[in-house]
Amino acid sequence: MANRTVKDAVTVKGTNPQYLVEKIIRSRIYDSKYWKEECFALTAELLVDKAMELKYIGGVYGGNIKPTPFLCLILKMLQIQPDKDIIVEFIKTEDFKYVRCLGAFYLRITGTSLDCYKYLEPLYNDFRKIKKQGRDGNFVIAHVDEFIDTLLREDRECDIILPRIQKRHILEENEKLEVRVSALEDDLDDLGESSDDEAPPSPVPERKEILRRHRSPSPRHRRDHDRIRRSPSPRYRRSRSRSPRRRHRSRTPPRRHRYDRSRSRSPYKSSHHRHKDDEHKSKKKHKKNKKEKKKEKSGEDLEIQQANELRAKLGLKPLK
């Protein structure tokens, strides 16, 4: 009963929504621990909280084909079929990037070609990094715009076969979709104008000018150079002979008296200083723990505030 689609569900692409996921992967999801513990009796309201807890995207991994939480939530969304407004709010949210990816993936599976291009193409401007788990279980760094581009161009993503959609140029020819304007076109136009305004490069100097610059030095400069390199006269040469007194000097440095600090200190003084150092370390550690607790508290408050904003957009009750 828990794995069946809701009674009032609408068929997607002419079939049961859950059948968009292959049977082998679907059975693995039903047997997974995350599905049994976290996705049991999950409603559209509770689905928002589970989506905000996502830390990465991915399909299945490992030799025994384990599904990721991202894939489990996709199947749960196909099972309960949340409203289109909730999916659009998932895509438009900017605070939670994995919630955005979840909504975009679900819309790509269930939506029409016009909806896919209308709601997913604006996400090309999202360059945030996301973690993606591969088939071997290792994590790689991806970006939101790369994920959206894969959804619109490829036939398979996160080990799920994506339904076919019409090409964009066909929709443009039928006047169902406007021509897409890239956000980089303005930058390219500015770059072209700045390159036109620049002055032309200076001409290359002629060969005679280059030879004149690198020709051999004059005889006068050659004489000065030879005079510098010439060795000094014997009259001004310094004698290398050492005096007898210096010759018989000992090379070993004299021994110096080493001052032992441990003897000069009394045991009472050393223990006193040691006690002070321990007090200073304990105070420093206490301050550090206080700062860390404040940071954790402020981070939790910020997450709760962002979650409440998303829940308010969806018409749900705020968190306590």
Image (cartoon, helix red, strand yellow):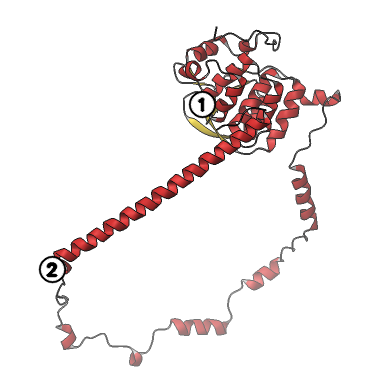
In percent of width and height, residue 63 lies at: 44, 18
Which residue sits at x=16%, y=68%? 265
User: Is residue 227 visible to the viewer in this orientation of the structure?
Assistant: yes
**Label number found at residue 280:** none
Report, in whole angstroms, how far the alpha carbon at label 1 lies from the one at label 2: 65 Å
Q: Quadrant of the N terminus?
A: top right
In percent of width and height, residue 185 lies at: 77, 43
Q: In the picture provided, is 202 more to the left or to the right than 51?
A: right
User: Is residue 96 visible to the viewer in this orientation of the structure?
Assistant: no
In percent of width and height, residue 103 lies at: 64, 26
Q: In the picture provided, is 150 more to the left or to the right than 42?
A: right
Give the residue type at disc 2. Answer: Arg
Q: Quadrant of the C terminus?
A: top right
The quadrant where residue 209 appears: bottom right
Query: Quick one: SS at disc 2?
Result: helix
Foreground pick, 101 / 93: 93
Against 62, is 238 above or below?
Answer: below
Foreground pick, 24 / 237: 24
Please name the residue that numbered disc 2 is placed on: 263
Q: In the picture provided, is 144 more to the left or to the right than 35?
A: right
Against 142, is 106 above or below?
Answer: above
Query: Quick one: SS at disc 1?
Result: loop
Give the residue type at disc 1. Answer: Gly
The quadrant where residue 5 appears: top right
In percent of width and height, residue 267 lies at: 14, 64
**Label number found at residue 134:** 1
The quadrant where residue 58 appears: top right
**Mark 1 surroundings: few (<14), some (14-19) or many (≥20) residues within 10 A:** some
Against 200, is 129 above or below?
Answer: above
**Mark 2 surroundings: few (<14), some (14-19) or many (≥20) residues within 10 A:** few
